[in-house]
Image (spheres, rainbow, N blue to C red):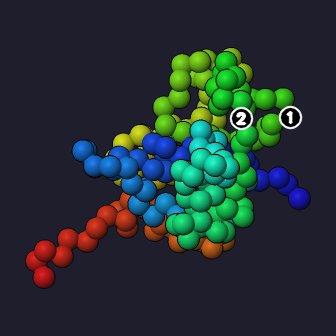
Amino acid sequence: MQRKTTLYIDIDDTIIAQVLAGSGFDLRPCIMSQLTVLGRMYDCCWLTSWPYIEPVGRGTGAAVATLVRNLYGASINETFRYADWDHDHPDGKAGFVLNEGAPEDWYWLEDPILKGEEDALVAAGKLDRYIPVEPTGPWGFLDAVNELFRRTGKTDADIRKAGGRPEWFDRAALLPVDDSDR
């Protein structure tokens, strides 16, 4: 059986963002449905500064597993892996994705990366595996996912095969309906 392409996904400014100017941070539109489908299509791995589980005694509630579970994402917690990366690595998160023994076939969805991370990806000839996510506004993650689909040759049929609906990945379908004239 062929191994699925690994997909590294960040959280802050990637799936959670300041959607409207001056607003707080919100989940991007349809994100839980999109993550569920991505987890079926790719070998997904959280690559984030968030801890996976809440550290004992901290009581902040800011942990990946807690966030996803509270958003009715138990299946996401079951299918996504978590990257235990070295926060002090000189190449940042790029040090993890480029580490010896890491999957060779991968993509990384992340808000703009640091110069050192970009330099490490360039030196490794892997900058094309990083897909930037616009850190503000509602559509940054969706746009990056659609770029991922383009690069990996995924189609509406693949989305359906994974139990999803193509409209979950279509900006026009996710726009609110203007019913002010009703």
From the viewer's perspective, tell me whether residue 47 is left or right of residue 43: left
Vertical arrangement, residue 73 with respect to residue 95, above or below:
below
Neighbor class of circle 1 (other Cα within 10 Å; few <14, some 14-19, many 20+) is few
N-terminal-most mark, 2 or 1 = 2
Quadrant placement of the N terminus: bottom right
Residue 115: image location, x then y, percent:
54, 19
Residue 108: image location, x then y, percent:
62, 40
Residue 104: image location, x then y, percent:
79, 37
Dot 2 amino acid type: Trp
49 or 101: which is nearer to us?
Answer: 49
Residue found at x 48% / y 31% = 112
Specify whether residue 153 is in view. no
Residue occupying the far right of the picture: 1
Dot 1 amino acid type: Gly
Indicate the secondary structure of the residue bearing disc 2: loop
The Cα atoms of the two marked residues, 2 and 1, are separated by: 13 Å
Indicate the secondary structure of the residue bearing disc 1: loop
Provide the residue designation for mark 2: 85
Vertical arrangement, residue 149 with respect to residue 176, above or below:
above
Residue found at x 59% / y 59% = 66
From the viewer's perspective, tell me whether residue 127 is left or right of residue 173: right
Provide the residue designation for mark 1: 101
